[in-house]
Structures are given as structure tokens and as C-alpha cells.
Image (tube, grey):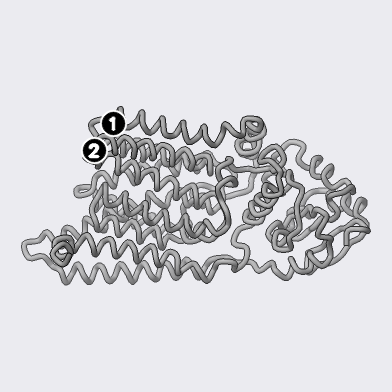
Amino acid sequence: MRAWLARNRRDVLAVGAIAIAVAVTITSRLSFLGGGEIDWDEGVYWLSMRSMQAGHPLFLSVYSSQPPAFLLFSEPPWALSWGAIAVVAGSIVGWRLGDRVAAVAVAVTLAVDPLMVRQSLVLQADGPSTSLAVVAIAFGAVAISSDRKRWGTVAAALAGAALAIGVLTKLLDVDAIPPLIVVLAGRGRWRQLFVAAFAGGIIAAGAILLPLHDAWGQMWDQAVGLHLTSRSGSFGLTLLGALHQRWQLGAVAAVGAVIGWRRHRRLVVTGAAWVAGAIMAMAVTHPLWPHHAVAVSPGYALLCAAGISSFFGQLLDRARPSTTAATALAVALVVGAALYLASGLRHLPAHDLSPLATRLANATSASGEVLGDEQFAQALANRASPPFFVDTSLTRLLAETGALQRLEAAADGHSPVCAVLFSSGRFASLPGFEAWVGNHYPVRLSLGPSQRVYLLPACG
């Protein structure tokens, strides 16, 4: 055993460093779990899952602006697991397409990237879909580096399956198609690998979509049609605004691409293809929100890793290897990564809605449904929502034809909706809606500043 460790000392050290990156990914987030709402979407998805658990079918009854795999396979505690999966899968990509130093660099970059930090804590589709994309590229890297044709074909099929599940979790995951093509094209038998990947994707997609065949029309209208009809809206970020969030990491990635080109061309080409794919996918996404920029994260990580590994290699390739300089560089990178992680954690938004949830629970009956614009508080209060209106975002209400009329029909003063919550300002911004609600729900209670609930007399 001692002799084996001596022969494989560098590999063991690299695996240990990756394990530390995974451990840091998990432990650094633990204290933030259950700390409050990070993004408004969380409450929407939380109530959606509760509606599905109550027996309401997805898309037919439960509205969803995301493809089916997200709500079918996600639960709130899984966000942290997806973050760790991305770190492990990223290290495999770095090792197979580069070397052990690149593997560690990819793992560390994904562990400290502020948007990856956020997506490892929030209940949104972006975190799982990005992790699945990294898993797909990892399988692709295994496929082209495996010495056994059979295992390479199986790995390519798994790459296609992982990417298909990722796209059916978040459509933005199409950004991983270009890097997967680049990776699989790096082997002489690329035609066989492409066929295997395509077959794996079709099988995985069929397994998810075929059981939902009765809801295909509604699925298209909700998960795709909404984003097409909302393109004329003025809300959201510009593409440059989304990319500007982490301009420092983008700059490091650009430098890494230049430095790493000669030694790690495959990593650079794959990372550049990923960044290009993500930018194109974001360019056609509307509205574009800050969390969508996480699609660029794996590409940035690969480019950073190419530069870091090449720089280390140049130091150690000299006639007199400068191990002291390499050690100093490693320490500087670790310190920089730690500070970057601390900054990302420090700037995490967290809204404590438990006081509002308590007041809402005290004001309403547990047996009736609440139509609201602050779903996270509603979920905390354990108050069900009309399944078709778990999502009351302005994106939907302003872009979807007839959405406001259907909203009023859901709150027509009849059971099971017995209360309407105004809290986030979304309902208040709908012209005439609050006056309409006041006519149908005569009891008005204040729950706090700019927070009120309208109830039927028997609802409290």
C-alpha cells in the first residue's frame, strides 16, 4: 500500500484536494439552509410540489413555467446535493480533458463561483440543470478517453441521457449541446459516440415525456409558450447586465483561455464552446434574470482551469523546477478562492418571511386555499394555493393572454379560495385587481406594512 501511494502520490493529492472542495461546498452552505427566501421563485415551486403531492397532475392542474423534470425530480434539500455533484463532475471533465491540476481547479472554481453558491441553496431549476449539463460533459469526456469501446459507447449514451434530462429540467440547458459535440468529436469513432448519445437522449426524454402525453399541449403553452409571448415585455436584465455580475471571473477565464491554449487546447475549446452556447441561449431567453447567468459557470471553470494548470506546468517544466513558486501560487489561489467564496456567501439575499407566515396562518383557515403574491410565506404558513395559480409572477400575468381574467375567475368568492394575499406588490400593480378583490372578499386584515389579506367572512 505504501509503495502504491508513493507511485501515485500526485494523483492521491489531487483526489484529496477535490474531496476537500466537495466538503467545502457542503459545509459552507449548511448554515444557510432554511435561512429564508433567496429568490421569489422558491415559493412558487414549493407550492407546486405540494399541489402535486396532494394529487393534482402537473400541467393539467398544476401550472409550471419549467419543463417537467424539475418538479418531478426536485425537492428542496436536493439543491445542496446538486452543487456537490457539479463539483465532482467538473473535476472529472478537468482530469479527462486536461490533467490532475485542471481537475482540482475546475472543482474549486465551481465550489466558489457566487452563482453556483446561490444555486446550491435555492429551489430553482437552474442549479439542477447546470449540474446535469456538467454530468453530461463528464460522461462525454469519459467516452472519448476510455480504452474500451463498449464502455465508451455506454458513457456517450449516458451523456446524452443526462443532457436530455437537463434540458427537460431547464430549457436553458441547450447551452451544453455545443461543448458535448466538441468533446465527442475529439475521438476517431465520433460517429458511433454521437449515435449513442442521441439514443441515450431519446430514451431519457421518452421516459419522462411519454407518461405525460395527455398534457403535452399544456406543457408547451406553459413551459415554452409563456417565454415566447413575454419577449415583448420590458422586465428582466439585458444580456450584458447578466454577464456583468461576475465580470471578474469572466476576465480570469479569458486570461486562462490565452495561457492554456498551447497545453490544454481541448479544455479551452470545450470551455469556449460552453460559454458561447450559454451566451446564445441567454440571448434568446426573455425575461432574463440574474440566476440565468449560472449557465456560463461551467465554461468559465474550464477556461480558468486550463490557465491555472498551464501556469503550474510552466513553472515545473523549467530546467530547475521552481516548486517554491508553485507552492506559493497554490497558496495564493487557495486564499483567493476562500475570499471569493466568503464574498459570495456574505452577499446572499435572505428574506425572513416567517413573521408574515405566522400572521397569515393566524388570519386564515387551514382548510381553504389562499391566492397570493408571496408564495414562500404562504408555503411556510402551510396554506394551499389554487394549483393553476401557484405562479402569479408578473411575467405570467402580463404576458399570458387572459391571465388576469382567469385570476379573477379563480378568486370569484367561492370555495375553496377563501383569501387573497397582497404582499410582494405584484397583485397591487395589476390595474383594478385590488378593488375587484375588495368587492368579493369583504373582510380586510392588515398583516404588516404593505401586507394585507382579503377574506371571506367564514375564512378566518
In the rendering, at what x and y percent does residue 215 appear? 65, 33
Q: Residue at x 30, y 59 (%)?
A: 104
x and y, in percent, of residue 400 in the image:
71, 38
- Specify whether 438 is left or right of 426: right
Question: What residue is shown at x 16% (from left), y 62% (from top)?
Answer: 4
The outermost residue toward the left is 319
* Observer-nearest of 57 and 240: 57
Relative image position of residue 10 (x, y in whole percent):
19, 62
Q: Closer to the camera, 156 or 428? A: 156
Identify the residue under disc 1: 190
> For the residue carrying disc 1, how many other residues have a C-alpha within 10 Å: few (<14), some (14-19), or many (20+)?
some
The numbered mark at residue 256 is none
Look at the image and tell me in which quarter the C terminus lies.
Answer: bottom right
Residue 42 lies left or right of residue 282; in this view the side is: right
* Residue 256 sits in quarter: bottom left
Query: Is the N terminus in the top left, top right, bottom left or bottom right quadrant?
Result: bottom left
Q: Secondary structure at mark 2?
A: loop
Q: What is the x, y in percent for residue 159?
A: 38, 40
Q: Looking at the picture, which amino acid does disc 2 mark?
A: Arg
The numbered mark, 2 or 1, whose residue comes first in the sequence reads 2
| Mark 1: secondary structure | helix
Tell me: residue 65, above or below residue 102.
above
Residue 330 position (above or below residue 73): below
Q: Identify the residue position indicated by label 2 in the image.
A: 148
The alpha-carbon separation of the residues under discs 2 and 1 comes to 14 Å
Crowding at mark 2 (Cα within 10 Å: few <14, some 14-19, many 20+):
few
Image point 74% across, 66% down: which residue?
A: 357
Residue closer to the observer: 105 or 100: 100
Inspect the image, locate mark 1, and give the three-letter code of the amino acid beneath it.
Trp
